[in-house]
Amino acid sequence: YLISTSLKTYIDNIKQCNIEMEKTTILKTNSNLDCLIELGGLGGNSESINLRHRYIKGGILDATNCESGIKINEGAMGILNDGIEIQSFNTYGIYVPKDSNNYSSDLSIISCYINGKGSEYNNYGIYFERPDNNLENLRLNALHTCIYAEAGGRAEKEISRCRDHHDG
């Protein structure tokens, strides 16, 4: 699928949705975008937020013209799983920025493959600015930094860091 704007989900639970793709589905863009997919990228009723997980499952995210493959915004706790492949992004495979409420991200990333452009680029497989994350069965390749966390509280299990990298 060729998209011209980022796929964004609502932050509130009334309009919540999940994204599920076949493992061979390719999502890409010819436009310069901040990210391909943004969990919590659309507003909503903040009173209805009770921190339910949204999920993204499957698919190949070709983020060639994007700053990030996936961006997880404020209050948008998520589960990324079942063979998601994120490739060719400019800076972040998965980006979890700080939020105004200082929520933990409570993010689970399970069975994903993140392939950067090479260690000579200043790119990050996963960049956390919020704590409390679970990483399991990941393959990180061709990145300057595989996993960077400004905040602690993460669990890691079966993480494969391939080729050149420097972790922060």
Image: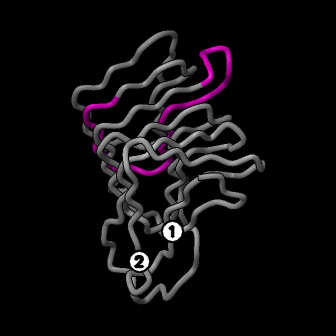
- Seen in the picture, residue 144 relative to 100 is either above or below; the reply is above
Q: CA distance from mark 2 to mark 1?
A: 9 Å
User: Residue at the top extreme?
Assistant: 164
Residue depicted at x 68% and y 43%: 67
- Tell me where residue 89 sits by quadrant: top right
Q: Which is more toward the observer, 9 or 77?
A: 9
Total number of numbered labels?
2
Q: Which residues are magenta?
A: 117-138
Q: Position of residue 64 (x, y in %)?
A: 67, 37
Residue depicted at x 59% and y 52%: 1
Q: Which is more toward the observer, 3 or 103?
A: 3
Is 158 positioned to the left or the right of 42 in the image? left
Q: Position of residue 85 (x, y in %)?
A: 44, 37
Query: Of callouts 2 and 1, which one flags the residue occurring earlier in the amino acid sequence?
Result: 2
Residue depicted at x 41% and y 77%: 16
Task: Find numbered disc 1 in the image and state the secondary structure of the residue it sits on.
Answer: strand
Q: Position of residue 57 (x, y in %)?
A: 35, 52
**Residue neighbourhood size for the residue with mark 2, other residues' Cα within 10 Å, grouped as few (<14), some (14–19), many (≥20):** some
Residue holding disc 1: 40
Q: Position of residue 103 (x, y in %)?
A: 41, 64
Q: How is the image coloured?
A: one colour
Q: Which is more toward the observer, 10 or 50?
A: 10
**Residue neighbourhood size for the residue with mark 1, other residues' Cα within 10 Å, grouped as few (<14), some (14–19), many (≥20):** many
Residue holding disc 2: 16
- Tell me where residue 153 sits by quadrant: top left
Is 33 positioned to the left or the right of 50 in the image? right
Question: Mark 2–mark 1 contact, CB under 8 Å?
Answer: no
**Which residue type carries mark 2?**
Gln
**Which residue type carries mark 1?**
Gly
Q: Which mark is residue 100?
A: none
